[in-house]
Image: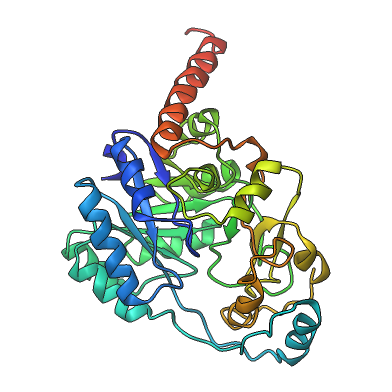
């Protein structure tokens, strides 16, 4: 299905409120594919968003699920005390949960969502087969060739290959707890070529893609579609907060990978909280996520997580359908220029 998209542009699932039914529907209307983000939402809220989306478009769309990881054994008392000293809000209690994974999985099967993607790990092979039997295309997010091989073995229909330049959480299956990105880092083109050398599945490329030339580049490198998140954060259809929009528009902050907000490596705009907790947060997700949730909810741009890819300063506000149309036009131009540079046979 992915290689038959009218436009090879996908709006990435952005958990935390940025992904909305309106955004998904507008991208679909423009010929692309939009994703709802089930992460952090209740099962009821996910059902409402799927229903709302089907009421806005009759075109295919996707839902992304977070695969639960192991409980952390890290002592979070010190980090909780540290966060309390940095914020006017009382930190939350660190706790593990599975993000209602099983119930959400059953929901997307029952609703026969056209595309279901997984992040942070692998779905069980039997669940992959059940989704496929229900008519869903199954996509697994990977960051390394080794993860790609594992995803191929469980029967995934396609892979979303995420480069380290991507905004938001890295989709690594396991966080090593030491390196900034939780493991070896590959830019999107390197990741795409290395994965293509190990598996023969349709590949979606994601990570720092904001221009049509980026779309053209990943298509030329073997992807069937380009997935963009940051490029859609400034659209009116996105649920991006006002403070986040302003920081993106200013374009002056650098980005960095951090565990400070959630306990899992994620790329965001550097603010005071990120800087003061550089390297301080243990690799404990979702425990740290719950600990910092009240702090992030203050709305203070120096305390909240503002995810963004490395190329975010190039993003300009526009309706989602216009963003898709612009990407297509820029991709055509980029391919034409590249073709003119290749000597004829």
**Apparent side of residue 307 relative to residue 225 in the rendered image (left or right):** right
Could you say where residue 232 lies in the image, as x and y percent from the top left? 49, 44
> Can the viewer see residue 209 in this picture?
yes
| Quadrant where the image shows the N terminus | top left
**Apparent side of residue 302 relative to residue 232 in the rendered image (left or right):** right
Q: Give the colour scheme shown.
A: rainbow
Could you say where residue 226 lies in the image, as x and y percent from the top left? 45, 41
- Residue at 48 percent of width and 85 percent of height: 97
Could you say where residue 271 lies in the image, as x and y percent from the top left? 76, 60
- Residue at 29 percent of width and 33 percent of height: 6
Could you say where residue 163 lies in the image, as x and y percent from the top left? 58, 50
Q: Is residue 279 above or below residue 190?
A: below
Q: Considering depth in this image, is 249 or 133 the residue closer to the camera? A: 249
- Count of marks placed on residues: 0
- Residue at 65 percent of width and 48 percent of height: 246
Q: Considering depth in this image, is 166 or 174 the residue closer to the camera? A: 166
Q: Is residue 249 above or below residue 213?
A: below
Q: Considering depth in this image, is 198 or 101 the residue closer to the camera? A: 101
Question: Which quadrant of the view contains residue 155?
Answer: bottom left
Question: Which quadrant of the view contains residue 244?
Answer: bottom right
> Can the viewer see residue 197 in this picture?
no
- Residue at 75 percent of width and 65 percent of height: 274
**Apparent side of residue 276 relative to residue 68 in the rendered image (left or right):** right
């Amino acid at each position: 299905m992915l290689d038959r998209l009218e436009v090879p542009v996908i709006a990435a699932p952005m958990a935390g409120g940025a992904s909305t039914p309106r955004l998904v529907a507008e991208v679909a209307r423009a010929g692309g594919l939009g994703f709802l983000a089930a992460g952090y939402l209740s099962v009821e809220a996910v059902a409402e968003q799927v229903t709302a989306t089907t009421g806005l478009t009759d075109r295919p769309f996707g839902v992304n699920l977070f695969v639960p990881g192991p409980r952390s054994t890290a002592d979070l008392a010190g980090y909780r005390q540290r966060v309390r000293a940095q914020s006017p809000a009382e930190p939350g209690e660190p706790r593990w949960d599975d993000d209602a994974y099983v119930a959400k999985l059953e929901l997307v099967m029952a609703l026969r969502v056209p595309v279901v993607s997984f992040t942070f790990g692998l779905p069980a092979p039997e669940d992959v087969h059940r989704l496929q039997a229900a008519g869903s295309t199954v996509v697994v997010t990977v960051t390394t060739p080794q993860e790609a091989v594992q995803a191929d073995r469980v029967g995934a229909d396609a892979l979303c290959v995420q480069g380290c330049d991507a905004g938001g959480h890295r989709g690594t299956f396991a966080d090593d707890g030491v390196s900034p990105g939780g493991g070896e880092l590959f830019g999107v083109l390197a990741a795409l070529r290395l994965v293509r050398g190990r598996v023969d599945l349709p590949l979606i490329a994601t990570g720092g893609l904001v221009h049509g030339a980026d779309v053209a580049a990943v298509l030329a490198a073997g992807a069937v579609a380009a997935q963009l998140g940051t490029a859609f954060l400034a659209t009116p259809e996105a649920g991006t907060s006002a403070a986040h929009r302003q920081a993106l528009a200013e374009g002056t902050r650098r980005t960095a990978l951090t565990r400070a907000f959630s306990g899992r490596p994620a790329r965001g705009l550097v603010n005071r909280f990120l800087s003061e907790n550089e390297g301080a947060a243990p690799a404990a997700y979702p425990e740290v996520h719950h600990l910092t949730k009240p702090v992030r909810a203050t709305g203070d741009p120096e305390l909240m997580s503002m995810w963004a890819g490395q190329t975010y300063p190039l993003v300009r506000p526009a309706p989602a359908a216009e963003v898709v149309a612009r990407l297509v036009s820029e991709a055509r131009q980029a391919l034409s220029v590249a073709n003119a540079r290749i000597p004829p046979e």
